[in-house]
Amino acid sequence: MFKLRTCEDTVFNNRTRPCLLYQIKRCSAPCVGHISPEQYALDTANAERFLQGQTQEILTELEKKMLAHADKLEFEQAAELRNQMSALSKVLHQQSMETGGDKDVDILAVKVQGGKACVNLAMVRGGRHLGDRPYFPTHVENATDVAALDADMDEAGEVTQQASGKQAKTLEALILEAFIAQHYIDVPVPPVLVCSEPVDKELMEALTAQVGSRVSAVHQPREQRRIWLEMAQKNAAIQLARLLAEQGSQQARTRALAEALDLYADNPDKLEALRIECFDISHTAGESTQASCVVFHGHKMQSSEYRRYNIEGITPGDDYAAMRQVLTRRYTKLVEAARNGEAKLPDLVLVDGGKGQVSMAREVFVELGLDLGLIAGVEKGEGRKVGLEELVFADGRDKVYLGRDSAALMLIAQIRDEAHRFAITGMRAKRAKVRVGGSKLEDIAGIGPKRRASLLQRFGGIRGIASASAEDIAKVDGISKDLAEEIYRALH
């Protein structure tokens, strides 16, 4: 609506012509001066005001400007403002909700089921409902322990009155209070919180002291607030049910793979700790080769444990050598750490490839003294069609075809695709850095955005600059002979 730019600063500072977003009227092209800095600053301010709920004032101002352009017979500019007003009105219609007298309110509802919890947070700002978002607190079992300690239990295990006469807190109340205490540390707190559970006065006093203005919590609300809370409670139940269904499906996939490969299928504890590592190699015609390692553990992908490896010293395009290098680097350190009890070896190592990649993995594992039964290659089926993949093993076992609709194959495909995604994004980033030469050129003293843009425009990219002589580089406007020689040395 306000045509604000979405590009990175490095792109913005080096544009010489508008991008596609300007052509489809999604950006006003401040990068090339198609809009004045004053007008762009005004559009930015209006976007901020819109998010703060000051929509009517913006519409009034736009209407005045539209009429002024129409009086001057500037119908094209007037039409643009009319379209902007129409877009604003459409968004406001989509967001409309009866808010009564409330302008800024947060509605929090908590639902606990199956050992998991969901806190649904709905926000009203400037009298407009901005939507809601589910949060899934971890360590719910800790809240369960606190609830047990906080309450006196009778022989039947039911909560009774505490010695002080104060009712013990429910598990839901403990979770909600913990969420409020953590969520609003760095987030602005509205004056009113509508909660599905009662909240301690001491917590609200702490929030009030933090904000510097009164913050109140409303439990068992009426009228419009009650409708909001019921909606939030319903959304919390839906989101939690969805999470449990997804987790149940993921656990079923893990169990199916364990059964297919005879990996702890009958031991729930070991199944929960099942660890799978998957490797993939990515490059473009041998350029910017990278290997990725992704980790599946606890029935889900563990992105914090992902690793990328820059592959060097091999023949460009030699995927086998690349796989050998990444496996050697990965497991040489891991074996030593495992011996010291500082790490755990995976229960299964997947490599994206057939017999060739598996043979390379076998050589590495033999050298390191690791169990060959850990290695499995994901070999593409006939015509490289999805669903026809087979597992190839390093220990001599026959190939295994899991079946197109197999839950085990779905899990393997998920892990393999994640390894491929992680590898290819890293490879593209590295390739872009090499081709654009952002860091190489910008690291040279005396090369600023303008000179860098001139060099790239003259030679068509970093490779063109690298292949040019110092004399050719010196012919670019703004590049002295000494600076050209410095650029040549830096790129060679």
Image: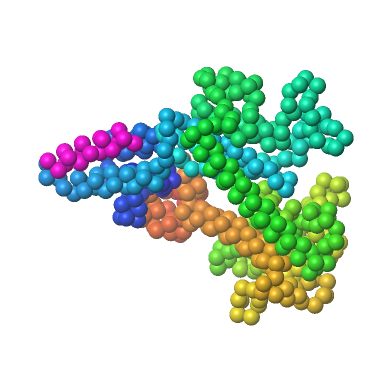
Q: Is residue 466 above or below residue 154?
A: below
Q: Position of residue 247 (x, y in %)?
A: 69, 55
Snapshot quadrant of residue 44: top left
Is residue 332 in view?
A: no
Relative side of 219 to 247, left or right: left
Dominant secondary structure of the residues highlighted in magenta in the image: helix
Q: Residue 105: within the magenta?
A: no
For the magenta stretch, what is the residue range?
A: 55-71
Q: Nearer the viewer, residue 435 or 180?
A: 180
**What is the residue that sits farthest to the bottom in this orientation?**
382
Give the residue drawn at x 65%, y 54%: 308
- 384 to the left or right of 77: right
Whether residue 211 sits left or right of residue 387 in the image: it is left
Q: Quadrant of residue 249?
A: bottom right
Residue 443 vs 347, above or below: the answer is above
x, y percentage for residue 465? Answer: 43, 56
In the depicted structure, whether residue 353 falls above or below residue 217: below
**Residue situated in front as seen by the camera: 258 or 325:** 258
**Between 447 and 490, the one nearer to me in the picture:** 447
Q: Is residue 91 left or right of residue 340?
A: left
Quadrant the N terminus occupies? top left
Residue 65 falls within the magenta-colored stretch:
yes
Q: What residue sits 68% from the left and 52% below the top? A: 244
Residue 298 appearing in the image: yes
At x 82%, y 75%, the residue is 397
At horizontal 25% and vertical 35% (from top left) the residue drawn is 61
Looking at the picture, how far across and down is residue 171, in whole percent? 72, 36
Residue 404: percent from the left, percent from the top? Answer: 66, 74
